Image: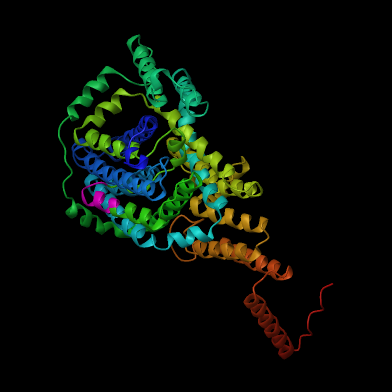
């Protein structure tokens, strides 16, 4: 047998398994908390229907990407191929719970109706992914790497890295120690005795500190015997059951659903493009259309079995690859998730492991992806990467402000925009810039790259695309619609016109552009002549 046929599992897969597996565990913890304590979903639905269906979806997804990595290994003859990581999309987890399921559950007084609306939301998004997959490779070809990786870095630095970083400093005795355990191994190359995976060492430290402190009454880490004992009530065998009736029942809320399903479907396309680009920068080329279609298909299967969360290729491929992950970690994670969710073990694990012990792994991934945006793009494109970050910073800041005001029982409109601006909180700017941040970052980053390269025609094309997407609310707007932010759309259009004029001035514009501008100038002269207006004096 060839080496590529025998490397289905390597020692590095243990590192990636514990790292990626704990990432999935964190996501399961968060979505379980959202469903139970925010949406008010009954435990019978959470542990008996939703988690088993989510486990099935992730099993299919991670198994498929392990197979895709195996195919790439065979085609290239390389043994260092790393499978794409995948699982429940984290941004969508919050959107479907807080924007779709919670409002509908409150409006109807029935959390089951919220669940049904979430299923319909994923149903619509799945088809956006499947059909949009065929345009994605073209988008990837015309978009510079700095724009793709820059907007991805924005997501990783804000929504992936900042929360775990803050959690670490809220419980520093546990968080900082676990972070140091991970850093010295994954960045410093330090090897623990018997090559024990760093992720496992970090979790072991976390367990010792958290449960040791609980034993003496300090409560560091938030674990306890009461919560652990209650978690055993969910142990049992739960297999997902078809939920077609619930999926189609949710169509009664289609008007509310489409407002977010279409733009977030496009977000999925761009996010997947970014992550495939990230994997290629790390040396592994995957077919974009096949990846996006797979996300749509497994999401559709999960939805029809009761899972209201979309599947996505994850940020972090370079991180798992750098710690030695190949293809085995992906398939093994899928099997582990299936066992945890179908047997109810997830409830016990969620009560056993302190979240803050896992948080440093997510911070590590955020650090790595943020660094990759600068390391894997031309040095001169660094300003474009920074520009691509800014919409995500705006979105993150707005999220924090909204959360703080909501906790105080008010909102930005009630406080008053003038008061907020007077205190230096430019809330209207954060709202407009942060909406559709992943598309906004991509467009701004691409414009900056092509201006740096003095390719004003392509910069103009991306500015024009920004004008169209802004006009219809796909970026810089709270919802899809017509003339959502017309002033900003017009500003993008003016930028596109200015950049095309710059191209003509430098003589770099295509012939059809020069001809079009010449015809427009001649038409203006004709109109002036008919109106009796003398032609404008030539500029110096």
477 lies above or below 40: below
Q: How is the image coloured?
A: rainbow
Judge by depth and name the residue closer to the eye, 301 or 85. Answer: 85
**Is residue 319 rendered to the left or right of residue 238?**
right
Question: At 76% from the left edge and 89% from the top edge, which residue is drawn?
Answer: 532
The quadrant of the picture occupied by the C terminus is: bottom right
Does the magenta run of residues contain 75?
Answer: no
* Main secondary structure found in the magenta portion: helix
Does the magenta run of residues contain 305?
Answer: yes
Farthest residue to the top: give it: 216
Farthest residue to the right: give it: 540
Residue 496 in the image: x percent, y percent?
A: 62, 65
The quadrant of the picture occupied by the N terminus is: top left
Start and end of the magenta stretch? 298-307
486 lies above or below 38: below
Q: Is residue 301 visible?
A: yes
Q: Is residue 356 visible?
A: no
Residue 426 in the image: x percent, y percent?
A: 59, 45
Judge by depth and name the residue closer to the eye, 56 or 492. Answer: 56
Judge by depth and name the residue closer to the eye, 356 or 55. Answer: 55
Question: At 54% from the left edge and 45% from the top edge, which residue is drawn?
Answer: 394
Farthest residue to the front: give it: 1
Counting the numbered discs, the total is 0
**Is residue 461 rendered to the left or right of residue 31?**
right
Residue 535 in the image: x percent, y percent?
A: 78, 83
Farthest residue to the bottom: give it: 530
Judge by depth and name the residue closer to the eye, 330 or 27. Answer: 330
Residue 501 in the image: x percent, y percent?
A: 69, 69
Residue 531 quadrant: bottom right
């Amino acid at each position: 047998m060839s080496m590529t046929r025998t490397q289905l599992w390597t020692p590095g897969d243990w590192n990636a398994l514990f790292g990626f597996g704990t990432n999935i565990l964190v996501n399961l913890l968060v979505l379980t908390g959202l469903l139970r304590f925010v949406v008010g979903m009954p435990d019978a639905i959470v542990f008996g229907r939703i988690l088993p269906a989510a486990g099935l979806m992730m099993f299919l997804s991670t198994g498929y990407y392990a197979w895709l990595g195996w195919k790439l290994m065979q085609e290239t003859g390389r043994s260092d191929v790393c499978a794409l990581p995948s699982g429940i999309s984290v941004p969508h987890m919050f959107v479907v719970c807080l924007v779709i399921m919670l409002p509908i559950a409150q409006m109807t007084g029935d959390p089951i109706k919220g669940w049904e609306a979430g299923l319909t939301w994923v149903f619509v998004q799945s088809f956006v992914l499947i059909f949009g997959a065929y345009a994605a490779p073209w988008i990837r070809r015309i978009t510079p790497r700095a724009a793709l990786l820059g907007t991805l870095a924005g997501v990783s630095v804000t929504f992936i890295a900042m929360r775990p970083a803050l959690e670490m400093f809220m419980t520093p005795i546990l968080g900082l120690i676990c972070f140091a355990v991970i850093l010295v191994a994954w960045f410093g190359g330090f090897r623990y005795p018997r090559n024990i995976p760093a992720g496992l060492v970090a979790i072991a430290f976390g367990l010792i500190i958290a449960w040791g402190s609980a034993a003496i009454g300090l409560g560091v880490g938030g674990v306890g015997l009461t919560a652990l004992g209650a978690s055993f009530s969910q142990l049992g065998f739960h297999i997902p059951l078809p939920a077609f009736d619930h999926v189609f029942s949710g169509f009664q809320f289609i008007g509310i659903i489409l407002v977010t399903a279409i733009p977030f479907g496009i977000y999925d396309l761009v996010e997947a493009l970014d992550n495939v680009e990230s994997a290629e920068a790390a040396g592994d080329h995957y077919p974009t259309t096949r990846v996006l279609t797979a996300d749509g298909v497994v999401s559709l299967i999960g939805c029809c079995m009761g899972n209201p969360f979309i599947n996505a290729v994850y940020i972090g491929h370079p991180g798992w690859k750098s710690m030695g992950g190949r293809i085995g970690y992906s398939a093994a994670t899928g099997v582990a998730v299936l066992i945890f969710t179908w047997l109810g073990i997830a409830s016990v694990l969620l009560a056993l492991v302190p979240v803050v012990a896992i948080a440093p792994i997510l911070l590590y991934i955020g650090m790595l992806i943020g660094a990759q945006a600068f390391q894997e793009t031309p040095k001169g494109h660094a300003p474009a990467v920074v520009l691509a970050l800014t919409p995500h910073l705006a979105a993150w800041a707005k999220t924090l402000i909204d959360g703080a005001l909501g906790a105080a029982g008010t909102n930005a409109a009630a406080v008053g925009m003038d008061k907020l601006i007077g205190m230096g909180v430019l809330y209207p700017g954060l709202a407009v810039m942060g909406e559709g941040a992943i598309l906004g970052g991509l467009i701004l980053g691409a414009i900056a790259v092509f201006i740096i390269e003095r390719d004003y025609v392509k910069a103009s094309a991306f500015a024009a695309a920004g004008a169209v997407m802004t006009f219809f609310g796909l970026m810089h707007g709270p919802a899809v619609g017509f003339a959502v932010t017309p002033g900003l759309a017009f500003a993008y259009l003016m930028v596109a016109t200015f950049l095309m004029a710059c191209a003509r001035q430098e003589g770099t514009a295509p012939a059809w552009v020069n001809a079009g501008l010449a015809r427009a100038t001649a038409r203006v002269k004709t109109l002036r002549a008919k109106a009796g207006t003398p032609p404008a004096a030539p500029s110096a």
